[in-house]
Amino acid sequence: MPSVPFASSADLADKEATLEELAPGVFAYTAQGDPNVGCVIGTDAVLAIEARATPLMARRWIDVIRTLTDLPFGDLVLTHYHAVRVLGADARRIIATAATARLIEERGEQDWASEAARMPRLFAGAETIPGLTRPTATFEDAMTLDLGNRRVELRFLGRGHTSGDLVVWLPEERICFAGDLVEAQAAPYMGDAHIADWRGTTLHAVDALNAEQLVGGRGPVVRGPAVADAITDTRAFLSTLFDGVHEVKDAGGTPRDAYRATHAALAPRYAGYPIFQHTMPFNVQRAWDELDGIDHPRIWTVERDRQVWDELTA
Ligand SMILES: [Zn+2]
């Protein structure tokens, strides 16, 4: 197998962003497979969903929001702890699950360094990051926000992409911002995941919302029957990888064997998806660990990233 550039380190061309109004005052800003963000315009303030990797990257999105409304920013919701979604944060109140707050304390520093090395393009203006983003309001299972003109529910639906993912649910409009629990035409990242829970009860709970529109972590907004398709597609990716690693492990193979087998199994359908190649070594290593009984995902560091990458893609 030819050697491949580390993670997304060679992915340096800017993506074209698309602003879509999903319902009056509800917007998604997607960017050809880069991390999606959104906002909901309330009566007195704007609710922001995700903060991007740096204040500079966040500013580019804020400039777009400023073409929509002059209202001040109120709450900022973070779907999970990954640096690429949180380090641009600056808001009156920053909301995440309690599990996400714990993960930031435990591994936020390492995750910042790891993600910056993996995805340099998304960290434009990295020198403007003031430090770790810490949520100022947390909840365990559910929280409801009253925006004056609509109700927004934040829900923890079970462990998945991380142990702390929330979804943003607009019950009247049946719109779901799913974070990285669901990807639409993009590869799921499983390096910090609880894969058995994710492909099982958690994705089932996302499905049970019966959303009419869904904004995944990456990829375009999906609507109608395409919502279930995106969930099914995400689950199929997780299962092919998890079951494939299990098979190789049972047969006495190595993580590198598992990487080769699952890469071959997934590539025909998923190789063209953004970050497919980037995610694969980390996905396989986490599946291996979970099958080994390691419930709490090991922390990725710059050194461990390289070590696993070199070992599995060699
Ligand atoms: Zn993530």
Image: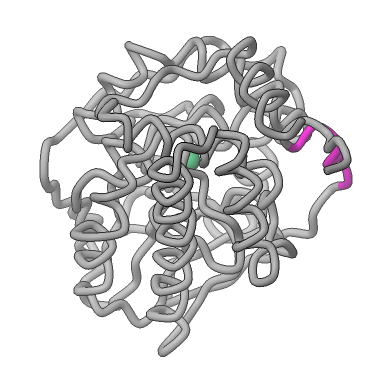
Q: Nearer the viewer, residue 26 or 209?
A: 209
Residue 68 rendering spot, x and y as whole percentages:
57, 61
Q: Is residue 9 magenta?
A: yes
Relative to the observer, which residue lies in front, 128 or 62? Answer: 128
**Left or right position of 208 against 122:** left
Q: Is residue 289 at least partly visible in the picture?
A: yes
The quadrant holding residue 107 is top left
Which color scheme does this rendered protein use?
A: one colour
Position in image of residue 165 (x %, y %): 31, 43
Question: Relative to 313, does residue 39 appear above or below in the rendering?
Answer: below
Report the residue at 14% width, 35% height from top.
Answer: 139
**Residue 99 shown left or right of residue 287 in the figure:** left
For residue 121, above or below residue 247? above
Q: Is residue 147 magenta?
A: no
Q: Residue at x 28, y 35 (%)?
A: 96
Q: Is residue 76 visible?
A: no
- Between 299 and 264, the one lying in front of the other is 264
Q: Position of residue 148 (x, y in %)?
A: 22, 59
Q: Residue furthest front?
A: 251
Please state the extent of the stretch shown in magenta in the rendering: 8-13
Q: Name the residue at 39% across, 60% down.
A: 177
Please identify the residue farthest to the bottom as the structure is shown.
225
Quadrant of the frame with the N terminus: top right
Q: Residue at x 62, y 60 (%)?
A: 30
Question: Which SS type dominates the magenta stretch?
Answer: loop
Q: Position of residue 276 (x, y in %)?
A: 66, 52
| Quarter in which the C terminus is drawn | top right
